[in-house]
Image (cartoon, helix red, strand yellow):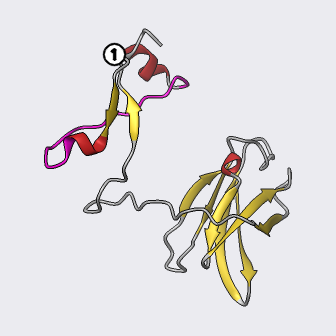
């Protein structure tokens, strides 16, 4: 189930799409997407992400259970912009631990081609590939 709408901030409008299950839109794993640039390109967020940057400001967002209201409250702290994860754009800097427990940093592989595979413990095929988890 999904609901579409627009929200107005300082005379500017941003379209959004709410996605819910079983008539609920406020669950932590629910989704909301914002057209932050007004170009018809929606960026997805989990409801549990709580924050979005719109029009140069950071807002804390909340959704009511029925998906009838989206509330934005300006945050006292501005969060950095999310990196663009589109083909041809540089990957954002990050650090993680590999499956052997060794710390890894993306910068260590600069100039080399690498394949990153992200797994989730909530994903059955992922758990089959990484049975230690």
Residue furthest to the bottom in view is 11
Residue 115: quadrant of the picture: top left
Give left or right: position of 126 versus 72. left
Task: Residue 87: give x, y in percent of width and height.
Answer: 28, 59
Question: Of residues 75 and 67, which is closer to you in this image?
Answer: 75
Give the x, y percent position of residue 98.
35, 24
Left or right: 121, with 32 as reference point: left
How far across and how far down the image is residue 103, in percent?
A: 36, 27
Q: Does the magenta stretch include residue 48?
A: no
| Residue 74 position (above or below residue 13) | above
Residue 68, picture quadrant: bottom right
Residue at 34% in and 60% down: 86
**x and y, in percent, of residue 75 in the image:** 74, 66
Q: What element carries label 1?
A: loop
Where 129 sits versus 109, above or below? above
The residue furthest top is: 132
Query: Is residue 111 part of the magenta span, yes or no?
Result: yes
Residue on which the image places disc 1: 100
Range shown magenta: 109-122
Residue 91 lies left or right of residue 124; in this view the side is left
Q: In this view, does 99 lie above or below 24?
A: above
């Amino acid at each position: 189930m999904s609901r579409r709408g627009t929200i107005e901030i300082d005379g500017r409008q941003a379209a959004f799409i709410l996605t819910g299950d079983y008539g609920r839109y406020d669950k932590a794993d629910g989704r909301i997407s914002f057209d932050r640039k007004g170009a018809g390109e929606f960026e997805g967020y989990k409801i549990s992400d709580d924050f979005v940057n719109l029009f140069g400001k950071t807002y804390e967002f909340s959704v009511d259970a029925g998906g009838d209201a989206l509330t934005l409250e300006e945050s006292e702290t501005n969060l950095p912009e999310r990196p663009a994860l589109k083909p041809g754009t540089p990957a954002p800097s990050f650090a993680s631990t590999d499956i052997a427990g060794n710390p890894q940093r993306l910068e260590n592989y600069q100039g080399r081609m690498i394949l990153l595979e992200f797994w989730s413990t909530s994903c059955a095929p992922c758990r089959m590939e990484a049975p230690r988890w």
